[in-house]
Amino acid sequence: MAQISLHRPFPAAEVPQWDYETDVAVIGFGATGACAAIEAAGHGARVIIFERNSGSGGASGLSGGEIYIGGNGGTDVQRAAGFADSTEDFTAYLKAAGGPCVDEAKCDLYGREALNHFAWLKARGVPYRGNYLPGKHIEPTDDSTLIWSGSEAAAPFCELAKPAPRGHVIQHKGWGGGRPLVDVLEASARANGVEIVTDARALALIGDGDHIVGVIVRIDNQPRYVRTAKGVVLATGGFAFNEAMRRKYCPETFKLNDPIGDKDDGAGIEMGVGAGGDAVHMDQFFTTCPWTMPESHAYGVFVNTKGQRFINEDCYHGRVSRCSVDQPDGKVYLLLDNAHFVQPMDFARMSIAATGDSWEEVEGELELPNGTLSATMEVYNRHAREGRDPLFDKRPPILTPLDQGPFVALEMNFFSSYFSFFTLGGLRTSTDGEVLDRTGAAIPGLFAAGRCTSGLPAWGHGYSSGLSLADCTFFGRQAGRKAAAG
Amino acid sequence: MAQISLHRPFPAAEVPQWDYETDVAVIGFGATGACAAIEAAGHGARVIIFERNSGSGGASGLSGGEIYIGGNGGTDVQRAAGFADSTEDFTAYLKAAGGPCVDEAKCDLYGREALNHFAWLKARGVPYRGNYLPGKHIEPTDDSTLIWSGSEAAAPFCELAKPAPRGHVIQHKGWGGGRPLVDVLEASARANGVEIVTDARALALIGDGDHIVGVIVRIDNQPRYVRTAKGVVLATGGFAFNEAMRRKYCPETFKLNDPIGDKDDGAGIEMGVGAGGDAVHMDQFFTTCPWTMPESHAYGVFVNTKGQRFINEDCYHGRVSRCSVDQPDGKVYLLLDNAHFVQPMDFARMSIAATGDSWEEVEGELELPNGTLSATMEVYNRHAREGRDPLFDKRPPILTPLDQGPFVALEMNFFSSYFSFFTLGGLRTSTDGEVLDRTGAAIPGLFAAGRCTSGLPAWGHGYSSGLSLADCTFFGRQAGRKAAAG
């Protein structure tokens, strides 16, 4: 008898019995799986979700519940706040955010469809207060809706697309809107007749020639055989918790110590590749350190261990963090003056590395040569007083002189400070969620979406909050609908 | 009938006739394929090499013919030059050069065996003059043997392993020792009874269940079926000439315009993955710009478009170049004073971006803000006069003040200057050259070596000249021997 393995489909001819029969099996019950299931059921398919945990959630349930939405003149929330967001600008931003890893077809489609997707989410019952919260926020601490959640207003993105805030956050007091978002989606899935089987971990796909015709799941410590008349949708997340995969495909993440997700072990990527799929951009990851909290710290200046700036600090906190991780010696410094310094958040695990009544004193306390950090800050402050940053094009109001001593350098160590991360590489899929083989052809019966695929958030340096949930929810729907079409 | 495809083994049961029967088929006739064939034949196997071109060579034939060798107290050449190279130091350097992508088992094995490998090469007839050529050279312009070919003497490598020169170059007047190296290996292969079939491009592996039992090659426009009693050795090189693969796995290379190699289209990687193999570190690539020619330019200082240094310029030219390509805005500047400037080589396509009687003038001509590049050079020169570089730990004699005007900034554009590149990611193999599947198990009958694998030169930022040919020749032999053992 064939072995049951993530790494190759189990032969249908050797299945001892069919324990479940359905049209579509969805593997994983985060936002991706929920949306795939809702859409498949809505298009007439019998659907079962199999989830390894005892309930829904996944990495989505641990997120902020923020979805990146715009285009077509803007959502009602954007328009009420004065932002007429064109499809051209929205799509151009999506493509810039994808950088060298961009999937242009996915950007084009989502650019056209995001407003319809927002309407769909609201129709499912996702609540939005509808207001705009200006300023720099990682997530709203109240129940506000619309925030700036990327690098839209910062160079070079603002030159490529007219800026607009596009992070749409579920109405929910405080952080952690991902949990209620998944709850709403779960309720919608149940209302649509989706069957949900928890404590059921996927072990292998089942193949019949070139077709995927089912999946094996472990339930009560037994393999159970699921026949899918139409398709399997992989919605299993990335591989931030799989050290062997990280070592082979994304070793830069070993600089970091705080994977986020919920057992994201890459199983869906392995199953997809084992079925002939193509895993792309596997070296890409998102990371961020919550350095913009308190908000006054957003006005700080980053330097590396050579006393050099390396980024326009007005861009997205995750872009600053990702560029930080490219710097040498495993750490960077956030420089602040007395007008902007507040004790950093404990959970960020940032410490004070140096203080001084002048930048020269801070430089000396960091044991940097004379004329390095102090020259950096002299150039920065001289131009900030003129409202410009000729080196990195940081812009007002975040661009402001840091010249009111005393001064401080906060140390951010990639490994010991809180740099959360998750992986962005994964299966290559069509805009319909079909898993593509290495020639670009769809693998019959196999679909995938979310972080087990490479999608809208393809490039760590371009990530913006809400891109991953946009990708999960929208392309989850695409995959579910296409699977239902058989 | 099944399709003939790189992407999955063709079923043995559907082979219409066997056109060739052999023990071992080697695909590709560069240094890797030649060494695999010699070793397989030397261990009693019938061997046929299939080469898509009309003769041997591959990327190896276009190389400098330099092989990275050391350890066990040093080669005769190293010892004669006063370098007692311990296995510990040699191995530690190999591991540092592999960085986050290192394959420790390969480093350990080659660290122990490199001297025996050198003896083997000499026994095959590879000639070495036996002398040591001090200084900074990309390749010797005479027929010298031993050169510094990596970052051994530069930080941080010199702190991790006692430095020694380890680049061993075939005796050959001028550049281009790769061609005579392959000629010697070809003669050895022929003398060992290896059959050579040229104008024969591999189209697909042939599989029988889990075993690879042959290969299909196109000869005279017809598919020809090759039965291998013992194994197929893939020796087909990287994917620098496959734009679709670069886009999916290594998009950073699109900053560059000069792939090097000989039709390296990744076919072996595709065949290996199609047979269940695992392609790792696919984002890694080597690049270099010949900026150390003329040699006085090796004393220059690199700055990015912000006027910042970013590397100790005394490390390997390829490491400087690779770090350059990480800098923003698509270009860097090489700063020189009158004591060191000579007209750059035409083929490097570097141009003079600015000149001045002071670094302030150069700064102004580059339209950089006052106090950027000039501050960088003030700090650099002040410490260089004391023989130290507190920022990047560049060391004498390459560390020297650049203070004799007039001054010049040479512009190196990643895309329009000559930045040669080739890819480093590929199949994951055992130290015996077995192609490993995603669980780490060997795929029966399938072997690989050289740049269709991820091996000693795993990390672009750590590449050193001679690492790739060391990997190709040594692990080519390993693969050939293991294949012959059946």
Image: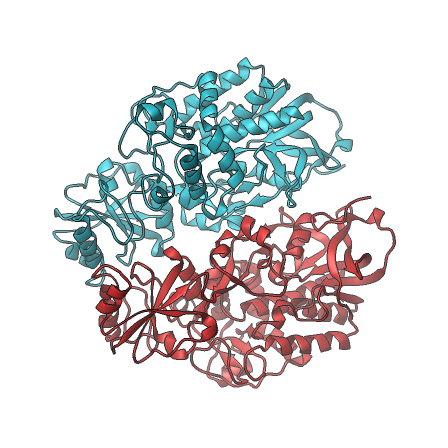
Chain colours: A cyan, B red
Above/below status of A54 relative to A99: above
Q: Disc count in the image?
A: 0
Q: In which quarter of the image is the N terminus of chain A?
A: top right
In percent of the image, x 45 and y 34: which residue is there? Answer: A468
In the rendering, at what x and y percent does residue B436 appear? Answer: 65, 52
In the rendering, at what x and y percent does residue A408 appear? Answer: 19, 48
In the rendering, at what x and y percent does residue B214 appear? Answer: 78, 55
In percent of the image, x 56 and y 34: which residue is there? Answer: A431
Q: Can residue A259 be seen in this view?
A: no
The quadrant in which residue B343 appears is bottom left
Farthest right residue in view: B17
| Relative horizontal placement of residue B305, taking residue A360 as reference (left or right) | right
In the rendering, at what x and y percent does residue A464 appear? Answer: 39, 38
Above/below status of A18 relative to B32: above
| Relative horizontal placement of residue A479, taking residue A82 as reference (left or right) | right
Above/below status of B28 relative to A281: below
Q: In which quarter of the image is the C terminus of chain A?
A: top right
In percent of the image, x 62 and y 65: which residue is there? Answer: B262
| Relative horizontal placement of residue A387, taking residue B459 as reference (left or right) | left
Q: Nearer the viewer, residue B380 or A438?
A: A438
Q: Is residue A218 visible?
A: yes
